[in-house]
Amino acid sequence: MPDDVASAPVHAVQRLREHLGIPAATLSSYGARDQTRTGHLVEVAKLLGWRPAGEVEFKELDQFLAARALEHDSPTLLFRLACDYLRSGRVIRPGPDWLSRRVAAAREVARAETYQRIEPVLNARTALRSELDGLLVVDPDLGSTRLHWLRTGLPDPHRRRSRPSWPSTRSSGASTPTPST
């Protein structure tokens, strides 16, 4: 039910009034007290098997998000996964601002966990660290970082932007991009 019952579609209000068997005047004053709407929301949620989130649910959600954030970096996807997780447990979703902050915290936990897992490997192989750092340096021939080049792949031949020509690796004359070392 909207905050202002008068703004609800007339047919919807009429159908609800008939279903509940109450006069129209009763619905027009519905929600005048905030506690009425809140109390009814709690009752309806309980009847449908939904429950408000408590400390246990928040902790479980944080653990779920941290695990998913190790797999995915997209905040939008993580937000959607969090909503699905809460829905599957029939837990009433907290506000989007609160949930967005939980997603951000999970991404930070995942970033720290990733660094903690990979740091010993990088320290043991300093050449690998230098090679990976090199992916972030702008290559003047490419006009971007090698990481960007690897992510975007071949240039679209229909684009008007000029791009560097790719070195040929085939004798047939076909060009295939290969990162130079």
Image (spheres, grey):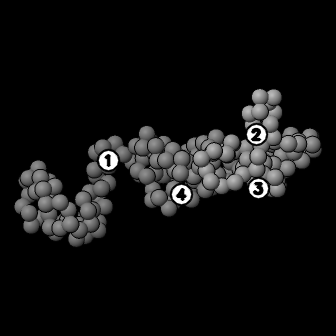
Crowd band around label 4 with a 10 angstrom C-alpha radius: few (<14), some (14–19), many (20+): some
Query: Residue, x 8% and y 63% (percent of image)?
Result: 24
Residue with the mark numbered 1: 46
Q: Give 62 or 172, whichever is nearer the viewer.
A: 172
Element marked by disc 3: loop
Among the two numbered marks 3 and 4 on one chain, the one whose residue lies closer to the N terminus: 4
Q: Give 96 or 62, whichever is nearer the viewer.
A: 96
Calculate the distance from the C-alpha at mark 2 to the C-alpha at mark 3: 14 Å
Residue 138 spot, x, y in % from top left = 80, 56
In this rendering, the count of numbered labels is 4
Among the two numbered marks 4 and 2 on one chain, the one whose residue lies closer to the N terminus: 4
Among the two numbered marks 3 and 1 on one chain, the one whose residue lies closer to the N terminus: 1
Q: Amino acid at mark 4?
A: Ser
- Which mark identifies residue 80? none
**Dot 4 and dot 2 residues touching (CB under 8 Å):** no
Residue with the mark numbered 2: 177
Residue 94 spot, x, y in % from top left = 45, 56
Q: Is residue 94 left or right of residue 100?
A: left
Residue with the mark numbered 4: 100
Residue sticking out furthest to the bottom = 32
Residue with the mark numbered 3: 143
Residue 158 spot, x, y in % from top left = 59, 47
